[in-house]
Structure formats: C-alpha cells, structure tokens
Image (spheres, rainbow, N blue to C red):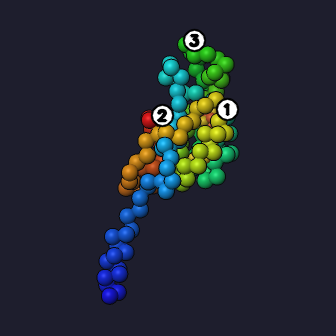
Amino acid sequence: MAILKSIGRLFRRRVSLEPAMSVLGRPRLTVHDTGQMRCTACSLCVGACPSHCIQITAAPRPIDSNTEPALSGDRMPETFELDLSRCVLCGLCVEACPVDALHLDGDLPAYATGRDHLRLDANVLKIL
Ligand code: SF4
Ligand code: SF4
C-alpha cells in the first residue's frame, strides 16, 4: 500500500504553471509605434511588486526624433528582468506604472525545465 502511495506521489509532482484564477497572462512590456519601450525606468513597479520579482537598471534614452519626448521620458531600462517563478500575476506592477508600459497579457509558458528559464529579460517580456 505504501509503495502504491509513493508511486502516486511521483505522478502528482508535476507542478502546473497555469494560474488558479483566470488572468490574461504574465506582465508584458509595451512599446511605442517606433518599437521603443514605453518604460522610463522609474522603478515604481519594482516597489509595488509584493514578490520582489522585477529588477531594473536604468540608462539614458537615446534621442529619437520619431518618439514624443513627453511620452518616452529621458531614461529607459538598460536591463529589465522579471522572475516569473516568483510572480503571482497580481497585476500590481501594471497598476503602478504611470506610462502604461506594462500589460498583463503576455504569453504564459505551460511548463519550465528550471527556474533559469523563468527569468525573463526585456526582449522576451515584449512578446505578447
Ligand atoms: S504581476 Fe504582481 S507579482 Fe507579478 S511582477 Fe507584477 S506585481 Fe510582481
Ligand atoms: S514598467 Fe512602468 S512602473 Fe515599471 S519602471 Fe517602467 S515605467 Fe516605471
């Protein structure tokens, strides 16, 4: 009997990454029509995140005559990393963002082979 229970536990160990409640997806970084990130590296989302899963380093934004200065700000993330293994999909980062740079509609992976695969950088976070 004990052996049967152990075998049963082995089959139950696969942990689903599907959220318990119905959400649209993971945080996604939005971009201007020009392709530039809206994010101004203000770090308000970092402070709002209860799971401490966002890390940002800031850099001056290159001057781009195609982008509205008032919309883009003078800084942008040099690096933007989100640890999806800690994210609870609460959307507080989306609410905290003053420039609509985050939406909760990014692609959620169905599974991951390790935590490293869930540390998403800006290039991945821009994908729907
Ligand atoms: S959705 Fe919630 S847990 Fe995930 S990064 Fe945003 S604030 Fe953090
Ligand atoms: S995503 Fe929004 S809140 Fe977060 S650093 Fe960028 S501009 Fe600020």
Residue hosting label 3: 65
> Left or right of 121: which side holds 60?
right
Please state which amino acid type lies under the numbered disc 3. Answer: Ser
Please state which amino acid type lies under the numbered disc 2. Answer: Lys
Q: Which residue lies furthest to the bottom in this view?
A: 1
Please state which amino acid type lies under the numbered disc 1. Answer: Pro
- State the CA–CA distance, disc 2 to disc 1: 18 Å
Measured as percent of width and height from the top left, residue 32 is found at 53, 23
Q: Which is more N-terminal, label 3 or label 1?
A: 3
Neighbour class for label 3 at 10 Å: few (<14), some, many (≥20)? Answer: few
Residue hosting label 1: 98
Q: Residue furthest front?
A: 22
Q: Is residue 113 visible?
A: yes
**Comparing marks 2 and 3, which lies closer to the viewer?**
2
Q: Relative to residue 21, is residue 31 depicted above or below?
A: above
Work out whether residue 114 or residue 23 is closer to the camera in this orientation and state it: 23
> Residue 115 bears which disc, if any?
none
Residue hosting label 2: 126
Quadrant in the picture for residue 44 = top right
Work out whether residue 99 or residue 56 is closer to the camera in this orientation and state it: 99
Q: Which residue is drawn at 34% across and 76% down?
A: 8
> Left or right of 3: which side holds 76?
right
Q: Does the residue labelled 1 lie within 8 Å of ligand 2?
A: yes
Neighbour class for label 1 at 10 Å: few (<14), some, many (≥20)? Answer: few
Measured as percent of width and height from the top left, residue 95 is found at 64, 40
- State the CA–CA distance, disc 1 to disc 3: 22 Å
Element marked by disc 3: loop
